[in-house]
Image (tube, rainbow, N blue to C red):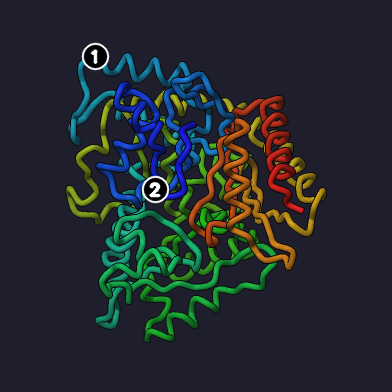
Amino acid sequence: MTALNSTGTISAADTAAASADTESDAWVLNTLRRYEPATMHTQHPVVWDRASGSRIFDRNGRSWLDWTSGILTANAGHARAEVVDAITEQAQQGLLHAYMFPTRVRARVVRALSELSGFPQSVLYTTGAEAVEGALKISSRHAIARRGLPPHGGRPVVVTFEGAFHGRTLGAQLAGGLPAQRDWAPALDEAFVRVPFPARGQAWSPEVIEAALRDIGAGPEDVTCVMGEIYQGSTLRQIDPSAARALREWCTRHGALLIFDEIQSGFGRTGRLFAYEHTGIRPDLLLVAKGLSGSLPISAVLVGDPIFTEHVRPGELTSTHSGNPISLAAAEANLALFADGRIVAQAAHRGQQLADGLADWVGRKPQRRKIIGTMGMIAGVACTDEAGSLDPRSSQRMATECIERGLLVCVPSTLGGAMLKIMPPVTTSESELAEALAIFNAAADAVQLG
């Protein structure tokens, strides 16, 4: 791993070495910093060369146990042979792009998605944010056609939750519940109503939705959809199952579509194929992306009833690369890995091992360590100061120490940069997870957290 100096740039010695080797880590880091905006460089300077299973490798022979999964993408492990073979075979067939023209691989993928999920239709896209936009469009078209929205000459209303993150496009960020991620946008969000998230252990009722609607002169009849996450990617708070049931009943009663964003939580991450299965209810639209292919860009809106899409205008849901044959080949092979349920069952077992290990980590120094949330193979932890407040500086030091010792972690910008987000591939073995937890404990001891 190449070190940065106090100004955040590469050292003079490494820069000199880079001039003699245009494949060196220093050359890569300097080149990226020269030709990309600084805002792009949010991760530690570990230059990936290859990845396999639960490990990342650089070109110098160093390896790291991966607690990022490429940000919840490589659920079934990096570079699965089945996925690599499918990508290679598709590329060798000579079909790399097909726009929205029919292909065999596209037909196989939408059929596999329906068989695996139980949702009768799929709309394919490339990114999670694009799937969010598609779901909002489906909901709006359905409401306008079936219910005559808006009934009083107003605007259709989308209900989302405070603390939500749904992507980085304009519509996705207006729908999100993080003010700092939409304060750049023009004032177009009066049709988005954000209400408190119905988290576990907190009193919550759909009345908060109706109160928020009254504040803007609207009512339940104006709502096209309610969109939320089972666990919030930004905060790791989990939805309360009883609140989810109340939300389902409210949406059904008022004709609004219920959308669950499982871009992060889908495909075994929480110990179920989809996290909504923990709630006992079913959404109308389900958004999936990261774990869908385990590698290449592809996302989907899973549609619970064909009636929801029957009034969308021709071409309104198309996208240039949504039917990309290479991405679809990866998705087809990856979906087959989940078909027999073994990966999901393993995720549940490893998730308990992770939760137990982190509880032990906190128990050693409870005054300086905090679990923010765990759900299967996803967890958030934080370092705290002596007063019990979140301590971003110690969390950053902890992340750096982990990486130096061979465990790749990341610290998102949410929660002020105080949360270490733990997201191993769900196929991580028992011994690999035990090794990673040992490194995590040693890193905490090294930075003297308590």
Q: Which residue is mark 1?
A: 93
Q: Which residue is mark 2?
A: 303
Q: Quadrant of residue 368?
A: bottom right
Real-space Cα distance between discs 1 and 2? 31 Å
How far from the left and from the top, in percent, is residue 26? Answer: 38, 31
* Residue closest to the eye, 258 or 165: 165
Q: Is residue 100 left or right of residue 168?
A: left
Amino acid type at mark 1 = Gln
How far from the left and from the top, in percent, is residue 16? Answer: 34, 29
Res. 111 in view? no
Circles 1 and 2 in contact, beta carbons < 8 Å: no
* Residue closest to the eye, 143 or 238: 238
Q: Is residue 363 left or right of residue 132?
A: right
* Residue closest to the eye, 277 or 231: 231
Mark count: 2
Q: Residue at x 46, y 29 (%)?
A: 335
